[in-house]
Image (cartoon, helix red, strand yellow):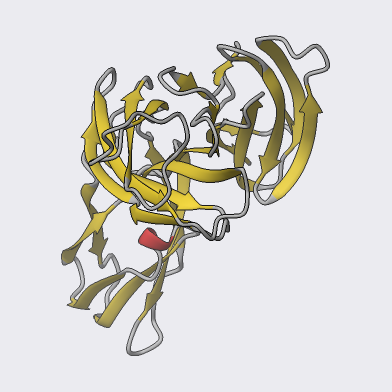
Amino acid sequence: MKLSKNEISLNLNAKNIGTGDFCKLVGISDAKEPVFKNKEFVFGKIEPAASKKWEIPLKIPKSMDSQNLPITIKFHEADSNQPSPFKVIIPVEGLYEPQFVYSFNIGTPLNIKVPTSAIPVGKTIPLTVEIKNTGKGAASNAFAIIKNLDTKGVFIDTGRASLGKIQPGESKSASFKFHIEPSLSKSTFELELTVLDQDLLTALSEKIEFNVGNSTTEPAANQWYEGPHITLGQPVPPITTVAQKQRIQATISDDQQVKDYFIYVGEDKIIYSSNPENSSTYKLDAELPLKTGNNLISIFARDNQDMMTRQSFIVEKK
């Protein structure tokens, strides 16, 4: 089952190979993924040698990772003559993810006749962010927001922009507005930029510091910024294994410096490693413990500006 189209049908056929009737026979699914859990296959009465089919339409989350998904079907029957439960494995091929890079610039407020190097008080400041998708997959439902990080005297006038679909290699612009009040007592303040694909749960998050006195920013405006790239080495981790541990090798690269990486298996942080040389590439080589069943492995990498990239996949331990 490839999730290029996230609407599928789950079909179950039941045949009575016995000599008596099944009465009010119902099959109920059980799985860790909520979308496959507690689905009812209502067969009703099935006479000997007869068969019935039940179909359930499902909408699969686009964020689901590649995996072998186990589903157990349990039965209920009016005379307690239900068949034994059975397990099926559904292979899922996840979608490629987008990866966002960004550039921004501060516009000139309206009705400013005399140029000034300082951010003017009480004037609406335009902030334009250019967002590009450099990943292998398309963003299907992206948006961008800016948020004031608890600085009194800074107000967001327009803080959210809908971007919709962004194909690989495509760029889109987001327009924001903010202003500062005389009550601002600091010489600098921070706004947090977040770009998120709501369907694939891929995100970019970055803090931008503004200097009120000279209108400079950190990081600097009118440059492109991107998070680290994570490239898995060979051999690529298997979907299914019988091993107690899984070795993961990868190269993390950045346009400036790789700061660190950390790895989770499920909700457990297994490894943290900082890059002592602050180089633009950093090698990852780790052995991760596996539990029986599906193990969600997530690699997070950060650069020197704390931009973070995540890559996740699932390994099933039999």
Residue found at x 58% / y 58%: 150
Image quadrant in which you'd find residue 314: top right
In the displayed structure image, the side of residue 43 where residue 198 appears, left or right = right
- Foreground pick, 191 / 233: 191
Q: Position of residue 184 (x, y in %)?
A: 55, 55
In the displayed structure image, the side of residue 44 where residue 194 appears, left or right = right
Residue found at x 35% / y 89%: 79
Above or below 61: residue 44: below
Quarter in which the N terminus is drawn: top left
Q: Position of residue 132 (x, y in %)?
A: 33, 24
In the displayed structure image, the side of residue 172 where residue 288 appears, left or right = right
Q: Position of residue 12 (x, y in %)?
A: 26, 58
In the displayed structure image, the side of residue 86 where residue 281 appears, left or right = right
Q: Is residue 1 visible?
A: no
Quarter in which the C terminus is drawn: top right
Above or below 106: residue 8: below
Above or below 49: residue 189: above
Residue found at x 45% / y 68%: 84
Q: Position of residue 287 (x, y in %)?
A: 77, 27
Residue found at x 21% / y 49%: 8
